[in-house]
């Protein structure tokens, strides 16, 4: 059963009680991510995520780790371009302990100077790790190309220079500006007593919070850019990204776009996987994925291939995009993909963690809960005509963004540009 409650300080509490489960997951979502940073603050959202686990007024970082392990649970966090999330998953009987721990982290984290200095080195190593992973690196470079000078183009981890010079007060100021109760959602899914939970949440999270000194959040839609970037790097393969315009996360055509992405490269039965890997053996890894933000989105195709096959792989990708733009998808493909989407959706919502994620995203994107039944009906309602229209709107080969990373020759780089 779904419930929504707005606490006295403006934090939204969204819950789904599922008595058949023995677990419960609590997520605290802050509607602030890397796109909300200034260039001088690059990486602050992610760094703050780290610091919430580095000690409170009554617990050390080791105490926090030992306490969650003793509950047999999981506590973690993640940062995206638009949100920062802290969550805990435990057996239902341990929910009171988990909430007390989460409350302590949220209200009483120290942000100690020594811990900040130590964590800078950890985050700098995380940034360097991306530089050593060509699949991650090419996608990061590609995002910078597609998003141009928009804040969404910046890496979530930030830049080495901004991390190296940040200070404790910088982080506290950022929290005071962005961690406003009106921009926060607490999502709870699993087995719990509804009355007890609402009273406990009101007591622990509803009467206080960071003092909001910032004005209204400033965001503006990205303009998706085309172009070509080819970077030479000593690797065994060339790693490629091809980018197309996508749609915002809550767009009315999002399910039709999911169909297009799935048929193009979103599964092992997709056209690109079958044509480039299975039929021609030109790549081991090839796939496509959608990135949807509150006010824009992209579709990205990734492939890793031998240096001599780069032009061939790119031409096959372009050909498939043109084919879908011109002819849409076949009826049998659409029917099969709709069944696949419904099955994946139902399986993905079998855990309290996934339900918690969906609750929060529904609230942040649309301000309302979308039931599984509603989603299945929307998928069933997708038509060939709708998919063809969306393909014409999104699959424009004249504005492709292409990024390459690997042992490319000067001739190849010049030819591809």
Image: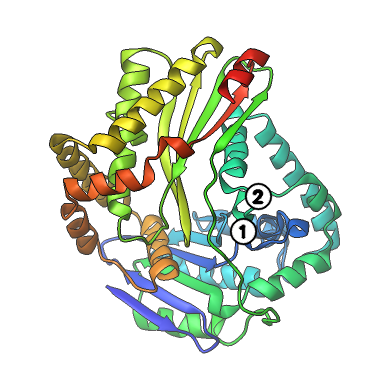
Task: Using the image, determine if residue 177 lies above or below residue 220.
Answer: below
Residue position marked by numbered label 1 in the rendering: 35
- On the question of residue 343 being in view, the answer is yes
Query: Which one is earlier in the sequence, the residue at label 2 or at label 1?
Result: 1
Say what secondary structure mark 1 lies in: helix
Name the side, left or right, on which 65 lies relative to 346.
right
Residue 341 image-quadrant placement: top left
Residue 370 image-quadrant placement: bottom left
Q: Residue at x 56, y 72 (%)?
A: 100
In this rendered view, identify the residue nearer to me: 104 or 369: 369
Q: Percent from the top left, x then y, of residue 154?
A: 65, 49
Query: Label for residue 154?
Result: 2
Q: Residue at x 42, y 26 (%)?
A: 286
Q: Percent from the top left, x then y, of residue 332?
A: 13, 35
Q: CA distance from mark 2 to mark 1?
A: 7 Å
- The quarter in which the C terminus is drawn is top right
Q: Are marks 2 and 1 in contact (CB under 8 Å)?
A: yes
Given the current orientation, which residue lies at the most extreme front position?
A: 398
Given the current orientation, which residue lies at the most extreme top position?
A: 308
């Amino acid at each position: 059963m779904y419930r929504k409650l707005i606490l006295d300080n403006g934090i939204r509490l969204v819950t789904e009680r599922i008595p058949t489960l023995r677990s419960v997951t609590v997520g605290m979502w802050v509607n602030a991510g890397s796109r909300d940073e200034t260039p001088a603050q690059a990486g602050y959202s992610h760094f703050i995520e780290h610091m919430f686990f580095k000690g409170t007024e009554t617990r050390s970082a080791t105490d926090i780790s030992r306490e969650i392990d003793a509950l047999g649970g999981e506590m973690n966090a993640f940062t995206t371009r638009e949100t920062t999330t802290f969550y805990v998953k435990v057996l239902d009987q341990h929910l009171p302990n988990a909430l007390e721990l989460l409350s302590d982290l949220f209200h009483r984290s120290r942000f100690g100077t020594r811990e900040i200095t130590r964590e800078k080195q950890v985050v700098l190593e995380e940034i360097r790790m991306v530089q050593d992973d060509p699949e991650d690196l090419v996608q990061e470079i590609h995002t910078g190309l597609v998003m141009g000078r928009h804040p969404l183009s910046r890496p979530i981890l930030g830049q080495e220079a901004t991390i190296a010079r940040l200070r404790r007060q910088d982080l506290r100021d950022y929290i005071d500006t962005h961690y406003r109760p009106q921009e926060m959602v607490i999502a709870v899914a699993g087995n719990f007593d509804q009355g007890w939970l609402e009273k406990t949440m009101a007591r622990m999270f509803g009467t206080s919070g960071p003092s909001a000194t910032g004005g209204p959040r400033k965001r503006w839609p990205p303009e998706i850019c085309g172009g070509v970037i080819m970077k030479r790097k000593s690797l065994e393969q060339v790693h490629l990204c091809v980018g197309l315009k996508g749609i915002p996360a809550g767009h009315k055509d999002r399910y039709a776009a999911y169909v297009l992405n799935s048929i193009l490269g979103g599964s092992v039965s997709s056209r690109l996987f079958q044509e480039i890997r299975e039929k021609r053996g030109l790549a081991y890894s090839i796939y496509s994925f959608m990135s949807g933000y509150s006010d824009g989105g992209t579709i990205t195709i990734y492939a890793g291939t031998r240096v001599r096959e780069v032009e061939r792989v790119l031409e096959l990708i372009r050909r498939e995009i043109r084919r879908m733009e011109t002819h849409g998808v076949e009826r049998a493909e659409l029917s099969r993909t709709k069944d696949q989407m419904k099955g994946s959706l139902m399986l993905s919502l079998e855990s309290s963690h996934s339900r918690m994620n969906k609750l929060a995203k529904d609230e942040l994107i649309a301000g309302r809960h979308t039931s599984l039944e509603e989603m299945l009906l929307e998928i069933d309602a997708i038509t060939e005509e709708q998919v063809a229209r969306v393909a014409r709107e999104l699959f424009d080969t004249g504005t492709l963004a292409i990024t390459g990373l690997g042992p490319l020759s000067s001739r190849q780089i010049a030819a591809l540009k």
